[in-house]
Amino acid sequence: MTQEQWGQLKKKLQQSVGQSNFRNWIEPLEFSSVSDGVATFHVPTTFLGNYVSQHFGDLILYQMSSLVPHVRRITFQVAANSAARPTRAPKNATAGAISMQIDSFLPAAPLDERFSFDTFVVGKPNELAHAAARRVAEGGPTTFNPLFLYGGVGLGKTHLMHAIAWELKTSHPELNVVYLSAEQFMYRFVQALRDRKMMDFKEVFRSVDVLMVDDVQFIAGKDSTQEEFFHTFNALVDQNRQIVISADRAPGEIANLEERIKSRLQCGLVVDLHPTDYELRLGILQSKVERYRQQYPDLVLNDGVLEFLAHRISTNVRALEGALTRLFAFASLVRQPITHELTQDCLADVLRASERKVSVEEIQRKVSDHYNIRLSDMIGPKRTRCYARPRQVAMYLCKQMTSRSLPEIGRRFGGRDHTTVMHGVKRIEELRVQDAQIADDLELLRRTLEG
Ligand SMILES: Nc1ncnc2c1ncn2[C@@H]1O[C@H](COP(=O)(O)OP(=O)(O)OP(=O)(O)O)[C@@H](O)[C@H]1O
């Protein structure tokens, strides 16, 4: 921050705190420098530093962050021979080499540079969530409020939220975009209560243009945090400010969340990130490899390795990334090409852990229960829709969740041909996009099977 920017900031602060507070507390501050995200001010006395930090620290930091986004903390130092002007406040500490450091809070959490739209790979399971996130990131008039993103662990919710924030910060730097986790929201709230700074808290949160709260399921069962969240939410929606929320499940499924919050959360657009499919996993791996190639330019990656990983590690994207990072690091250490054998050696534990615990029989049983048909009818020859559809769902899940080949799956479905299985799997892939009921059934079944 330059002295000129500090001058601008002082004008803003003057409006916020009033003339008399400004003269007593802000004017005596002398801006020194910003280094590593810490802005340092010289103050004439410890008392003044303490007072400003307690009463105006959040406000200063908050307003400063719109001018200098990387500032995350402010400190007040009583330096020897400080040139800071004396204040009318009591001087109960002498100026000297006393240095104090008081952290103030900034509501926003830092954003991960890697989580941008450029690095987000789009596939069928996440295309709707991605499109909705893109729309919000355009920053135009709010069309749906809130945008509620939900999905299982490691499927890209946080990545998409950060991507929205980055995009908005670049294309609309004037907007005040705040991203934080629900846990941080609670922490700030409790801190404000404790320090009797609720007015600051309310002012800060109610003046944001775009509020993004990650993992909102965290506030379930935390009554006063929910209450405050509800008021913040309403105040922002009433002013047409955009809200983006994420959670690990749909609003209606979050236990111990007040009904009025659930219904508020549902009144915008609710989209889910489906578990990754093979194509998306492969796409993600390929895009990560492109980036790794810069880091490890000499490494040789054999054909088929990525396909193998995309087939075998079908859990969340985080696990997939972890496996790939380990593989590249290992291969570069031992200076060997990444072959199928090396992959199996290096990732033996991951591969064993992801070895399908789900069996074809278990899938067949769960799916017949779900659709209320007999297991014998699922495997048997009947071809009416009420049996054929559950059968195709079961075939699809077997393909997705087990390492069985199409002919093997066919054999376990009453000796059917592999082309029948292939047709069934394709049909469900199409229906999953067109038919919300099928998509929900698949999600529910998958979750039950994964236990
Ligand atoms: N479609 C994708 N393209 C590229 N990377 C992805 C994609 N989906 C997820 N990732 C990566 O997977 C990792 C986990 O994603 P993220 O943290 O966004 O998951 P999450 O849904 O928020 O999970 P959690 O519920 O654990 O918070 C991140 O490194 C992210 O970049």
Image: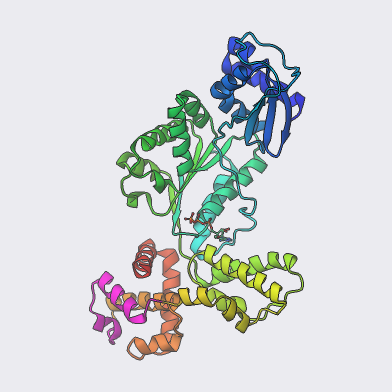
Q: Residue 62 vs residue 418: left or right? A: right
Prevailing secondary structure of the magenta residues: helix
Quadrant showing the N terminus = top right
Q: Could you tell me residue 105's position as x and y percent? A: 55, 33
Front-most of residues 421 and 362: 362
Q: Quadrant of ligand 1?
A: bottom right
Q: Could you tell me residue 168's position as x and y percent? A: 62, 42
User: Is residue 112 visible from the viewing direction of this image?
Assistant: yes
Quadrant showing the C terminus = bottom left
Q: Residue 194 vs residue 76: left or right? A: left
Where, by quadrant of the figure, is residue 222 drawn? top left
Where, by quadrant of the figure, is residue 419 drawn? bottom left
Q: Could you tell me residue 287's position as x and y percent? A: 64, 66
Above/below status of 443 relative to 364: above
User: Is residue 68 visible from the viewing direction of this image?
Assistant: no
Q: Residue at x 41, y 90 (%)?
A: 417
Front-most of residues 421 and 168: 168
> Which stretch did the figure color magenta?
357-382
Q: Residue 310 vs residue 406: left or right? A: right
Q: Residue at x 67, y 43 (%)?
A: 170
What is the image's colouring? rainbow
